[in-house]
Amino acid sequence: MRIFLAGATGVIGRRLVPLLVAAGHEVVGTTRSASKADELRAAGAEPAVLDALDRDAVLKAVDAAAPDVVVHQLTAIDKTDFKHFDRAFALTNRLRTEGLDHLLAASLAAGARRFVAQNFIGWSNERSGESVKTEDDPLAAAPAGESSESLAAIKYIDQTITTTPGIEGLSLRYGFFYGPGTSLGIGGENVEMVRKRQWPIVGGGAAIWSLIHIDDAARATVAAIERGAPGVYNIVDDDPAPVRDVVTVLADAIGAKPPRRVPVWMARPMLGGFGVAAMTSLRGSSNAKAKRELGWKPEYSSWREGFRTALG
Ligand SMILES: NC(=O)c1ccc[n+]([C@@H]2O[C@H](COP(=O)([O-])OP(=O)(O)OC[C@H]3O[C@@H](n4cnc5c(N)ncnc54)[C@H](OP(=O)(O)O)[C@@H]3O)[C@@H](O)[C@H]2O)c1
């Protein structure tokens, strides 16, 4: 098939291009910078240099590519800032709304059959009730801290993807990424925080996190490009776990001292309501639907072994 991959040079795009090429697909991949075009060519993709927020450029590039499937992997995530979360996600939120609209319009105009979009699941889950949620459970009714715009953008992807007529839309809600190139990979921002004991366990660390190795996320994306009914899918591993375990195992995997522990009242001024929720009240996610309907399962079924491979 011909695939138009928006965001081919990103953390996931980079892992996805070789998998698609190896599976026999023809890939047109986007970047904003001409200097990354050679990197894409070397990986076996045809580069398209554009700004995804420029509607005309997107329409033109998708039309020229004449794809069967369009894939949205655009993000622009600034340094982690739990206290001012929407500020750090402002451009990503535009890519998830305006960027999605441009790509969908271009897909329809070019006659693409299928559309696969990157989304996220984790802090967007409702933070009450069952500790592990499925795609049938509603997302958070109220945002934690300063995350209302980011939560709205996540809901926008699910809603738009599943209601746009004329296209088979799939929203892949990836859990927290770890592995090469991510903030939870060697040299990544969050790994370095753990190394310096700057990521404490807050208030018992009972929030449930669902993670996914970046290569398992890429493999799930190939599956969703090739098969599966339209809809929303959680792409997470089999081991939703309290964040206190995540930080403790991470520290152990990199040979760092165990994380400090701090009470909520002490952490709140620094982390804000969003950061406190991320450490104390998040719910995890089930991957049963993706396994059942995409014929995919994570090769790293638990982040516990995945961390040792990716970080040890
Ligand atoms: N589920 C998760 O946990 C999750 C999800 C996403 C990201 N992350 C984390 O976020 C960090 C990096 O993410 P990132 O978003 O900064 O970068 P990234 O993944 O390195 O790049 C995202 C892609 O979007 C493209 N892009 C961004 N803005 C664009 C625009 N206006 N027009 C066209 N293309 C555009 C980039 O292309 P060019 O730069 O080549 O133009 C790149 O291909 C990592 O730590 C990763 O783990 C986590």
Image (cartoon, helix red, strand yellow):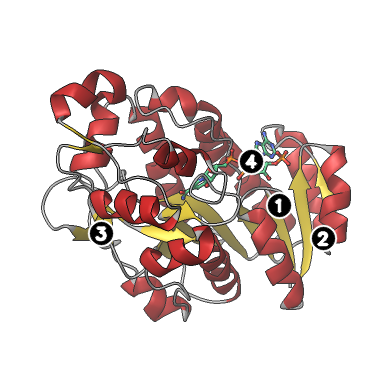
Identity, as a three-letter code, of the amino acid under mark 3: Ala
* Label 4 within 8 A of ligand 1 by Cβ: no
Residue 34 to residue 147: above or below: below
Mark 3–mark 4 distance (CA, rounded to whole Å)? 37 Å
Look at discs 1 and 3 and give the one toward the viewer: 3
Contact between labelled residues 4 and 3, with CB atoms less than 8 Å apart: no
Inspect this view and state whether residue 153 appears: yes
Q: Residue furthest top?
A: 269
* Label 1 within 8 A of ligand 1 by Cβ: yes
Q: Position of residue 260 (x, y in %)?
A: 26, 37
Look at discs 4 and 1 and give the one toward the viewer: 1
Query: Which numbered disc covers residue 241?
Result: 3
Q: Which residue is mark 2?
A: 45
Name the residue: 45% across, 72% down: 300
- Image side of residue 48 versus residue 271, left or right: right
Contact between labelled residues 1 and 2, with CB atoms less than 8 Å apart: yes
Identity, as a three-letter code, of the amino acid under mark 4: His
Query: Which numbered disc covers residue 8?
Result: 1
Q: Earlier in the sequence, mark 3 or mark 4?
A: 4
Identity, as a three-letter code, of the amino acid under mark 2: Ala
Q: Residues within 10 Å of mark 3 (few under 14, many from 20)?
A: many
* Label 2 within 8 A of ligand 1 by Cβ: no
Q: Position of residue 193 (x, y in %)?
A: 43, 36
* Label 3 within 8 A of ligand 1 by Cβ: no
Name the residue: 30% across, 25% down: 271
Query: Which numbered disc covers residue 102?
Result: 4
Q: Residue furthest left?
A: 129
Q: Earlier in the sequence, mark 4 or mark 1?
A: 1
- Image side of residue 46 versus residue 207, left or right: right
Q: Earlier in the sequence, mark 3 or mark 2?
A: 2
Q: Position of residue 159 (x, y in %)?
A: 40, 49
Look at discs 3 and 2 and give the one toward the viewer: 3
